[in-house]
Structures are given as C-alpha cells and as structure tokens.
Image (cartoon, rainbow, N blue to C red):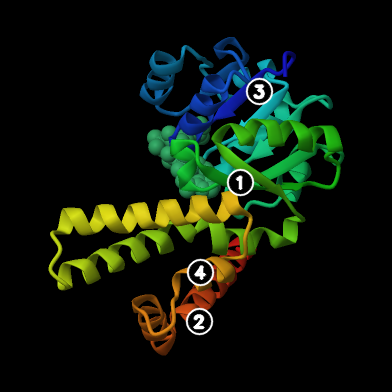
Amino acid sequence: MKSIQLGIVGAGNMASALVRGLIVSGRLSPAQIRVSDVSPAQCQTLQQAHGVQSADTTPALAAWANVVLVAVKPQVVPSILPDLAAAYRAEQLILSIAAGVATQVFAGALAPGARVVRAMPNTPALVLEGVTALAPGEHATEADLALARNIFDAVGATVVLDEPQMDAVTGLSGSGPAYVMLVVEALADGGVRMGLKRETALALAARTLYGSAKLLLESGEHPAALKDKVASPGGTTIAGLCALERHGARNAFIEAVTAATQRSSELGQR
Ligand SMILES: NC(=O)c1ccc[n+]([C@@H]2O[C@H](COP(=O)([O-])OP(=O)(O)OC[C@H]3O[C@@H](n4cnc5c(N)ncnc54)[C@H](OP(=O)(O)O)[C@@H]3O)[C@@H](O)[C@H]2O)c1
C-alpha cells in the first residue's frame, strides 16, 4: 500500500467513512489521500478531522492519484467523466461506489482497457462495520481486486462477486440496514405494547440484534441451529416464532430483497 496515492472524488458520508477507516487502521497515511468536492467545506471537514489534503478540482486530483475512488452520487457521475478521462493514465485504477453505475460506463469514457472495480458498501461502514461487495470490471486484475479489498476492509468486511450480482447485493446488504431498522423499531413497539419504556425497549431490541449477529458470525453455526437452541418445547420462543410465521415474516423479507433487487436493476437500465 506504500505506493498508493488515493484520490477521492466526492467528500461526503461514504468518503468520510473510508478516510477514517483507512487512517485509523493504518492502511494509508493522511499524505496518501486527497479529496475533492464541489463544496470546499466538505473537504475542510475531512482535512481537519484526518489531516488529508484536498485538491481544488477533479482534474488536479486525478492527475495526482494512481487510484481514483468515485464517491459522488450516481447522477453526478456523467459530469465528472470528462475530467477523469482528461487525466487518465493506463497505470491508474478506478474504484467506484456509485450505486448502479456499471464498470463499463467508466471504461467507455476513459479507455477501452481501463481497470475498474465497482464496490457496493452499506451504511454501517460509517461505524467501520459495513459489508462491501466488490465486482471487477473486464480488465481489472487480481492485484487490483486485492487492493480494493484492502481499502474496503478498512470499513468492515468485503466479498467479491460478478458484476451482474450487484443488483441483488443492493437489494440485500445495500438496502438491508433499512430493513433491520424497521425490525428494531417493530420489536421495540412490541416491548412498549407489553409495558416497557420506549428507551428500554429500543436498547433491548438493538442489542438483541447486534449480539445475535455477532453470535452468528463468531459461532459459524447455521442461523436455524441457533434459533432451535432457544426454542424449548412448549416455551415462549416457539410461541413467538409461530406468530412470526403466521404473519408471513420470512416471506416478507424474501419479497423485500426481491423488490429492491428489481428496482436496482430498473434504475441501472435508465
Ligand atoms: N450511503 C450509502 O449507504 C451508500 C451505500 C452504497 C453506495 N453508496 C454510493 O456512494 C456514493 C456517495 O454516497 P454518499 O452517501 O457518501 O453521498 P454524499 O454524502 O452526498 O457525498 C457525495 C459528495 O459529492 C459531492 N459532489 C457533488 N457533485 C460533485 C462533483 N461534481 N465533484 C465532486 N464532488 C461532488 C457532494 O456535494 P453536494 O452535497 O454539495 O452535492 C457530496 O459532498 C453514491 O454514489 C452512493 O450511491 C452509498
């Protein structure tokens, strides 16, 4: 990572999370990261918090960087492509977190052999507990993927898959934090209905989710096995599980991921 000069276009939420993760984990030094943004205040915030430099313009940033991370909203991408193309060099690697923007869009604008890796992080990256799916473009190498992995590991876990699966990733882990918030809120509502204070109910619900996820990941057991362990014969948990099944909770989540995946695919085709 010593030779990396990471230029980040768009100094918003995700860029901030990545800069923080990269510096806190010691993967990159502040001198190895520069940011650019239409609003100078965004760059100043990152500069003050992490000591990274800002570039005045996207062309200046791209001219300095050997790895360019595109972290602007998807609808902004077309407007920055000419600037990236003007500064593009064959040794440059392009990383993009712009949701729904195909690697081919970058390769098409920069050069036919441009090396591009697309990434789909999620909001828990803001607390360094995200999960990011990485998809290599046509010309990205194993070394490019390893580098992308190293960068996104700074804000959580990473998985590598093929680009056509990115819509399903958007439907599951991209949109997933919203589903989970709905579950926490609903569990807390249940607790309030049964007489708990709102604050207590929310803390219990959130901690139950957090601890269960940790238990699942650390034990390596199948979720059904862990569920069975707490469902004793004729007990409280099996009564609760039956109520969930009766109301179609399992299918509701399958349908949620399906609907969000289809919507991601629709938006990507526009
Ligand atoms: N947040 C998520 O959960 C998540 C998950 C996966 C992927 N993503 C993707 O990550 C990207 C960034 O998301 P975000 O939540 O970090 O967005 P954000 O906070 O809005 O950050 C984007 C930044 O880019 C700036 N910008 C706008 N036009 C620009 C230009 N031409 N040149 C340079 N900077 C420009 C924006 O400034 P202004 O605000 O002044 O316009 C803003 O500061 C998006 O493409 C999104 O699809 C986000």
Label 2 – label 3 distance at C-alpha: 46 Å
Is the CB–ligand 1 distance for label 3 below 8 Å?
no
Q: Quadrant of residue 43?
A: top left
- Tell us which disc is closer to us: 3 or 1: 1
- Tell us which disc is closer to us: 2 or 3: 2
Amino acid on which disc 4 is placed: Lys
Query: Residue 137: horizontal and vertical position, in percent?
Result: 79, 46
In the rendered image, is residue 68 in sight? yes
Q: Nearer the viewer, residue 129 or 89?
A: 129
- Tell us which disc is closer to us: 4 or 1: 4
Badge 1 is on which residue?
Answer: 132
Image quadrant holding the N terminus, namely: top right
Helix, strand or loop under label 4: helix
Amino acid on which disc 3 is placed: Ala
- Asked if residue 193 lies left or right of residue 72, the reply is left
Badge 3 is on which residue?
Answer: 62
- Asked if residue 149 lies left or right of residue 250, the reply is right
**Earlier residue among tags 2 and 3:** 3
Q: Nearer the viewer, residue 192 or 77?
A: 192
**Earlier residue among tags 2 and 1:** 1
Residue 229's mark?
A: 4
Using the image, determine if residue 93 lies above or below residue 133.
above
Label 2 – label 4 distance at C-alpha: 22 Å
Q: Nearer the viewer, residue 264 or 132?
A: 132
Residue 251's mark?
A: 2
**Earlier residue among tags 4 and 1:** 1
Amino acid on which disc 2 is placed: Asn
Total marks placed: 4
Residue in the picture at 52% in, 39% down: 72
Residue 41's mark?
A: none
